[in-house]
Image (tube, helix red, strand yellow):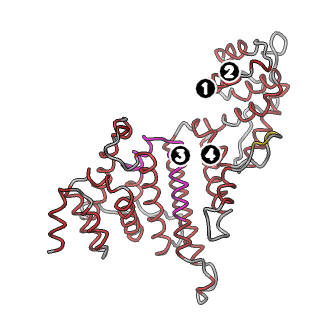
Amino acid sequence: MNGIEWPSPGASLHSIEAEVKEILASAGVQINSCYPRGVPPMLPLPMAALVSLTITFKLDRSLEYIQGVIGQALENCAGGSSWPSMPIIGALWTQKVRRWHDFIVLSCMRSPFGRDKDAVAQLIQSCFSSFLQSSSSGSDIIANRGVGALLGDSITNQGLRLPMAPGFIYLRTCRTFHDTYFVSEVILKQVIEWAHKLANGWCFNGPPQLKSGRTPLSCAASMVQQVALLGGGLLCIAGGPLVVQVLYEETLPTLLLSARDQSLKGPGPVSSTLQGYAMANMLFYCGSLLWGADRTSPVMKLSFLSRRPRVVRTHMDFIAGVLDGHILLGCDPGTWKAYVSQFMFLVVKFVPSWLRDIKLDTLKKIAAGLRSWHEHDLALSLLERGGPQAISVVVETFL
């Protein structure tokens, strides 16, 4: 496509790239140019053949529906290639149909996230920052300002409007993330770091002797809960069932078994507790969003839903093994206690049907661990919801 036999993308390529960079920068994501000036733009031969075929169609407003067919096909082909093809495709189509400009720019906006992990990490960080920083000044963090800052109002009748909200970009691009396990690690790290920040904000907000000047600890805990809910939502959208399964079976256990993060300086008891609280909430939200609470629904016959009993059972066995002393922890004891207590509380209260698939010996070990922390009511509730197999243990508890 040298501009003689076929149109050249050079006329609008750098303009398209500049617009994409400006949009992403408004959401806190910095990327490098794929085609510096002086470097001739090139496409792989099969891609060039497909583009040359599609741009020969004569389009008028009665054939606008072809945009959905052609656009999706070209995006899928460009996304499956390691070569950054979408900016060139966008530049060519912008010259052909100028009224599709905004649609083409939004399509090109997805391209960097398929090959640049750093861009993905920046976008996830911006999602947390935009939601939490805009809400942290008030006591009600589920106010519209937090959601508004996350999702924004980026497209109006006048076209694209900057700044563009990171949550909107995340929803449009998350299906292009190739390494969803990397995404899972980044989201989990963000949840833990924000729990640490919120704990420090509570500890250092105002003079120690003036406790009335502090943000209430209940408010900090509520904000941590929202952090976990946001993290769980972002993870489920981008990663799907397999990543949630890995989170239960590998990612969370590995994190709890490993040494505490030295980058979180001076965590303290409040920070350690809120980190465990955040991890438990995130794990529960991911599972409940994906699997629900019903054990008998016909929907449970779907393959990813039918894995729930085994996945939850594996995680419960891990918790029981640690409480029984057979597995050694690397995390802070306060983090572990908060994690187990909160996760068990959520399961017992909201999805007790999950406990019917857990082995009785596992339930007994977990209940014994909870009683050692003086969580007698929670331990009893756990056994009561363990089904007929646990009735004898419940009776023994009262004797």
Region of the chain picked out in magenta, as a range: 224-251
Residue type, mark 3 in image: Val
- On residue 118, the disc is 4
Q: Which badge, 3 or 2, comes first in the chain's sequence?
A: 2
Residue furthest bottom as drawn: 209
The amino acid type of the residue labelled 2 equals Ile
- Residue picked out by circle 3: 183
Report crowding for label 1: few under 14, some 14 to 19, many 20 or more residues within 10 A (C-alpha): few
Q: Identify which residue is drawn at 51% across, 41% down.
A: 180
Residue that numbered label 2 is attached to: 70
Q: Nearer the viewer's eye, disc 4 or disc 2?
A: 2
- Residue 183 locus on image (x, y percent): 53, 46
- Give the distance between the C-alpha atoms of the residues marked 4 and 3, in whole angstroms: 11 Å
Residue nearest the viewer, comparing 157 with 8 = 157
Instruction: Name the residue type under label 1.
Output: Asn
Q: Amino acid at mark 4?
A: Asp
Name the residue beneath numbered marker 1. 76
Mark-to-mark CA distance, 3 and 2: 29 Å
235 on left or right of 171 = left
